[in-house]
Amino acid sequence: MVRNKIIIAVLSSIFCLTGCGRQSAPDSSKISTPVKSSVGINRKTFSMSLPAGWFEDTKDDMYDAESFMFFENPESCLFCVIIGKKSAGFSVDEMLEKHKEQYSAKMTDLSTSSFDDWSNYRGKGMNITGKVQGAFQYRCHLFGFENGDSACVIIEAANPADFNKFAGDFELIRQSFKLK
């Protein structure tokens, strides 16, 4: 459990280094403790189902309930949503490249592959696998897509064993996620 908290802390710091620049105060009305059963999340920018046992991390300095959210489970699983407007300069390509660079700088024994589909969305994706700071195996799926003026980057991350153990949770999120 301590090891998983270390991994999440390291990965959260990686995300903070990406330069997204969100500095919103946390909204304490959002889910911050693990839910007992799957719950629907319906925001202005997106909707999805949050699996049982997961929670929304509203304490991150970059948190914004409509544009930069972190969802986690008690193990090492992380689901991050970043939503921006293309008309305001948000670029899927730039965000994906920034995250790839950050992971590459923090991971050793790195391997990458690409994919084009995530749930019902077509876009650009990459799988990144390696060891965080040379110590912990970690896998990350980055995916970006556009819908009208909205652009979205999805990050799914966990150690390989948790990716397998919680595959159903990630699938519930994928199948229920809707960008508005």
Image (cartoon, rainbow, N blue to C red):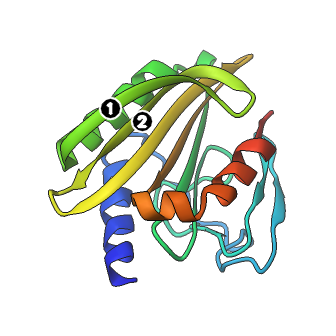
Which residue is found at the position 80% from the left and 46% from the top? 176
Which residue is found at the position 33% from the left and 66% from the top? 7
Residue 112 tag number: 1
| 52 with respect to 95 (left or right) | right
Mark 1 crowdedness (10 Å alpha carbons): few <14, some 14-19, many ≥20: some
The three-letter code of the residue at mark 2 reads Asn
Q: Where is mark 2, residue-wise?
A: 127
Q: Is residue 91 among what the camera can see?
A: no
Q: Position of residue 173 (x, y in %)?
A: 71, 51
The three-letter code of the residue at mark 1 reads Thr
* Secondary structure found at label 2: strand
Which residue is found at the position 52% from the left and 19% from the top? 89
Residue 93's quadrant in the figure?
top left
Residue 12's quadrant in the figure?
bottom left
* Secondary structure found at label 1: strand
Quarter of the rendering occupied by the C terminus = top right
Residue 135 tag number: none
